[in-house]
Image (cartoon, helix red, strand yellow):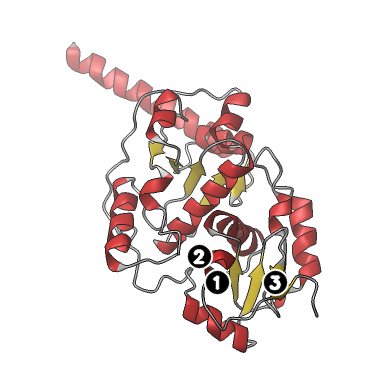
Amino acid sequence: MKTSVLVLAVLLLGVSCGKKAEKAESLPPLPPLRHFVGAALLRQHLERGHALLILDIRREADYAAGHLPGAVNLPLAEVRPDPTGRLPAARRRKIGEALRRAGVRPGLPVVITGGAGRGGFLDAALACWVMALGGVSDCHVLEGGTSAWAVLGGSLVTDRFAPLRVEGATAEIPIDPPALADIDGIREATASPDTALVDVREQASERIPGAYVLPLLRAIDSRGRVDRKMLDDLLAGSGVLAEAAAIVMGEGMEDGAAGWLLLSRGGGLAGAKLFPGGVRRYRTFPGLPLAPAGAE
């Protein structure tokens, strides 16, 4: 009798799973995640069961107060490079270990969710750049952060989630990450036409002669959402997409990382790197050119 009941349960489960699979196959395909994603589209992907790693980069206390279901906490402070942009071996190992603990690995799409507003977007963009250092290119920012998810009606939970442990390659940061530009690269770019310098600051009293002035952050509104049309217009009018490679600089690390994300992912310039120290660090090196803004 018990065997018959068990067989019947298995058969019913198989029928149920089959119906769910047929229903999922019959649904129209979803738009893909495009590096900055709205809460509504993210929820649709999760409801379809798409494999995603959601990383909440807020402080542990904020995460504990409420986060997206299934989100793993990886506070930005644990993976943020030195403000100067240096990545010595010890720091590379520490960041790589934090990424591995969080379940980050190449080939698994990552969605970064952080705080609300423009500042939250900049923090999430920095986290995506760190993912790129570890070989993860399929990284997306949840526009508006966790707050946008809640406003949409998405549930917030307080359970702490641990990443699934899977076999395979994990994120490691090599000695010379392809998304990282150092001061030697800046010096070469100022003297060579092979690599463009892109200054994404919105306002500045001085500029780097010959650099593209491309205030991409204007496309990020106060809610932390990207105006796609404005971004496309800024990129199309700049001419920078004709370049094979570029080094992005903001005033510091966060605004530079946001510019890097918008250019390399939103604009498709795969050869873009970030100089994380930004113009703030650039100024400390004597001999590197600077000119008043507006000067010929």
Residue 58 image offset from top left, x and y in percent: 45, 38
Which of pointers 3 and 2 lies earlier in the amino acid sequence? 3
Q: Residue type at mark 1?
A: Tyr
Left or right: where does residue 239 sit relative to residue 167? right
293 or 21: nearer the viewer? 293
Q: Quadrant of residue 257?
A: bottom right
* Count of number-bearing discs: 3
Left or right: where does residue 280 sit relative to residue 132? right
Which label sits on residue 277? 2
269 or 130: nearer the viewer? 130
Task: Determine contact: label 1, label 2, CB under 8 Å.
Answer: yes
Q: Which residue is mark 3?
A: 207
Residue 140 image offset from top left, x and y in percent: 54, 49
Q: Residue type at mark 3?
A: Arg
Crowd band around label 2 with a 10 angstrom C-alpha radius: few (<14), some (14–19), many (20+): many
Determine the residue located farthest toward the left in the rendered image.
Answer: 2
The residue sitting at 24% across, 18% down in the picture is 6
The residue sitting at 61% across, 62% down in the picture is 250
Quadrant into which the C terminus falls: bottom right
Q: Residue type at mark 2?
A: Gly
Q: Which residue is mark 1?
A: 282
The residue sitting at 44% across, 41% down in the picture is 57
Which of pointers 1 and 2 lies earlier in the amino acid sequence? 2
Crowd band around label 3 with a 10 angstrom C-alpha radius: few (<14), some (14–19), many (20+): many
Q: Is 64 drawn above or below residue 202 in the view shown?
A: above
Q: CA distance from mark 1 to mark 2?
A: 7 Å
Crowd band around label 1 with a 10 angstrom C-alpha radius: few (<14), some (14–19), many (20+): many
Q: CA distance from mark 3 to mark 2?
A: 16 Å
Q: Is 97 drawn above or below residue 17 in the view shown?
A: below
Can residue 194 be seen by looking at this rendering? no
Q: Name the element at disc 2.
A: loop
Left or right: where does residue 258 sit relative to residue 21? right
